[in-house]
Amino acid sequence: MTAAGAEPGQGGLLPRGQEQQLPLELGGDGFGGLVPAGELRELTPAERVEAELAILGIDLSQHVLTFYARLIAELGVIRAADLHRCQPGERVLVAGVKVATQTPAIRSGQRIIFATLEDLTGPVDLAFFESVQERCAARVFGSWLLAVRGRLRRVGRSVSVNAAECWDLAALAEIRAARGIGAVRAAMRAGDVPGGQVAPGAPAAATIILPNGFALSRYAETGGPGGPVASPPRLLWHASPGSAGGWESAGGREDAGRGR
């Protein structure tokens, strides 16, 4: 660094015309010996995507799901682009990055959790009805990579999935790495998959009764999604504490902006 253009008497800097190179002490931090100058290693693909999510809130170099491609193929996950080939009522397994959640009030009085996943081919719209929220709600709001099984619903040209079960995709990948795909399938059948779960013995969330008498479901999302710093940034998805939304039907396509 050069102290140039300083006026005499300003903070002890040299007068104009008597500039010199200031010493830059780098030897005391210990990094000089660990990483020689100009020899920083290239980021791995996983590190690069992690940095992109942390800084930009979006994966640029490659989709997050590319790191789970083998697991997704072994489980027989159906891509968003291929859902239109399935029959109404058919059981399907989908997976993706959670990009939207909503819990709007509807006329029937139920509180349905609507969510949207995105895989490498497009969005998948999901509906979690009250009958499945006891076992699914914690993961829906606590995880950002999800695998979901349910039945296909078709309204006109729009398709969605009425969800029955869901799992944390990252947790499934850890099981596969440690014990193989057979252990993953067994854990999914038994429901023994960590991630986004309520701690054993924790008190159940109470139903909120509003002053006007309206009962707010205990699974209604009342804050921003996501969790600790280890989770991707808030910009990765859109969420609303509840609105009428732009759904064509229960489980139809949401007209909500996405952060991707």
Image: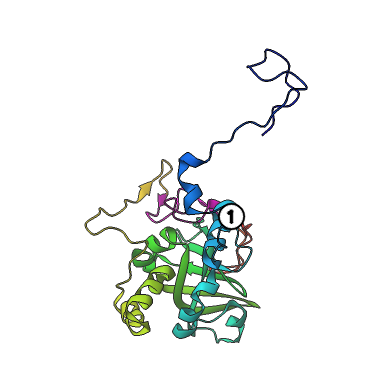
User: Residue 74 in the image: x percent, y percent?
Assistant: 45, 85
Viewer-proximal residue among 79 and 214: 79
Q: Tell me the residue at 31%/59% (across/down).
A: 198
What amino acid is found at the position of numbered circle 1 in the picture?
Answer: Gly
Q: Is residue 60 above or below residue 25?
A: below
Q: Is residue 260 above or below residue 7?
A: below
Q: Which residues are magenta?
A: 215-243
User: Residue 156 in the image: x percent, y percent?
Assistant: 64, 78
In the picture as drawn, the residue positioned furthest to the right comes out as 17
Kind of element beneath mark 1: loop
Viewer-proximal residue among 115 and 78: 78
Viewer-proximal residue among 233 and 46: 46
User: Residue 57 in the image: x percent, y percent?
Assistant: 58, 55
Q: Is residue 13 above or below residue 37?
A: above
Q: Residue 235 colored magenta?
A: yes
Say whether residue 110 is visible: no
Q: Assign the C terminus to one quadrant of the image.
A: bottom right
Q: Which residue is mark 1?
A: 57
